Amino acid sequence: MINVLLIFLVCSVIFYFYHKTYVGIYVYIISVFLAPYCSIGSLNFRIELLLTPILFAIFLLRKRRVYITKIILLWLLIVIYLFLVTFISNDYDLDSEVSYTTGFNFIRYGFLMIIASNLKTERISNIKILRLLLLVSVPISLIGIGQSIQNSYIISLTEMFYSSVNRPVFQGLMEEISKHSDYIFRSIGVFENVSYYAAFLLITTFVSLEFILRFYKYNISLKERKILIGIFLLNVTSGILCSSLTYYGGVFFIFLYFLVFDFKVMFKYVILLVIAIIFLLLYLKIKYSDTFSVYADNFNYLIDAFFNGRKLGQRYDFNERSTGDLTKVIYDNFLLGSGFRSYKNLGVNDSLYLEFFYSAGLIGSILLTIFGIWISKIIFTVHYNNRYFFSMILILFLLSGLGCNSVSIIRFSEWFWMFIGLLMIDLKETKVSLFNSN
């Protein structure tokens, strides 16, 4: 059944993308978020690895002119640099291998930016894919909540679509649930990692609140606003249950943002949110009275760790990490980095900044910083009316990067890089043309 569903999704995306590009992109994003993993024999991979190059090839065939902006050229230069560094970096006799999948992902991000930045004539925009993100957040949040309270239908869905031998995180969740039928679990949604899930919920919480508070700016009707309030509360509930410092810390900055720009309106929603949280906690206390204290202790630990910086200190304390050789690898490849080379027992995926510096070294990190500054400049010039909104989205991604590689999150990264590409639609600069047909 899963293989039939996957074939249907792939064919649907290709069909719509060929006939109506913007519809194909919407279906593509939804499919990437919700589709199960593809399995061909012992090979297990995600649907976007197959779809992205196919869509890019179709895009090149259909478009009479395809332009590449200078900032995308910079990204492609960074990718070439990382591939070159991969084969000249020193592995110091450690057990290492080249992660071609990671390299291919970086190429795919370039493909997505090229597609998105050439969609000026299509009926698509950053605001529209932000709305699409909120739509997708509904089933994902429901899956996460179901995992936390062990709803039998959600558990069966997780086992059927998102759990396999090659997905150890989901397997671990299933094993823990089978042992403790009365526990409240930290949910992971469809992302395999609590920090990934928290980063996703952080963005959807912020976007939904932005649309609610400034509904007049985005032409949102009263009916749509009520729906958005429901989505917002659903995302907050999921965020609380995932019990991640990434989410709790990020929400703190979201409140600061709205208190600065919409203090009076925000005050009303803070009261509404507090009431909703109280009712949620009371429900959990009554429903899971025997084990609620375990969840409460974890919540208290994370809050305490946030304010005294203990969790952050642990994550960036190389002496405390199980990856004892990480410091040596980074230090010895300080200038150029290690590229797409991965080392056994060296874990850097829980930090965007560690992974970038580990992979790109000083030179590559400077290039990546220039790329980020360039994106910020585009937001403040081309998207002046939404400059604070879009900037805050990027800031939340960067804050999430303290706990995970937030710009390469499984399933979420496709949406993120499409969003970055759409920022470049109205760039007024000389662009490189791949094709110049009349």
Image (cartoon, rainbow, N blue to C red):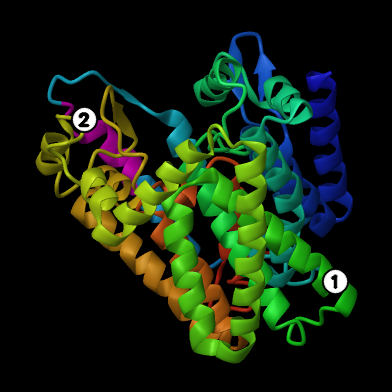
Q: Which of 188 and 186 is in front in this view?
A: 186
Distance from the alpha carbon under mark 2 to that under mark 1: 48 Å
Judged left or right of residue 262, residue 394 is left
Considering only order in the chain, which callout, 1 or 2, is on the residue closer to the N terminus?
1
Label 2: how many Cα within 10 Å (few below 14, some 14–19, many 20+) = some
Relative height, residue 331 to residue 368 (above, below): above
* Residue with the mark numbered 1: 224
Q: Where is residue 187 in the image (x, y as percent from the top left)?
A: 57, 38
Residue at the image position 12 percent from the left and 25 percent from the top: 92
The span picked out in magenta is 81-91
* Residue 436 position by quadrant: bottom right
* Residue with the mark numbered 2: 323
Amino acid type shown at disc 2: Thr
Quarter of the image that includes the N terminus = top right
Q: Position of residue 318 (x, y in %)?
A: 16, 40
Residue 111 at least partly seen: no
Q: Where is residue 263 in the image (x, y as percent from the top left)?
A: 55, 88
Relative height, residue 264 to residue 219 (above, below): below
Tell me the tag on residue 165.
none
Relative height, residue 125 to residue 110 (above, below): below
Residue 309 at least partly seen: yes
Q: Where is residue 420 in the image (x, y as percent from the top left)?
A: 56, 64
* Residue 224 position by quadrant: bottom right
Circle 1 SS class: helix
Residue at the image position 57 percent from the left and 52 percent from the top: 239
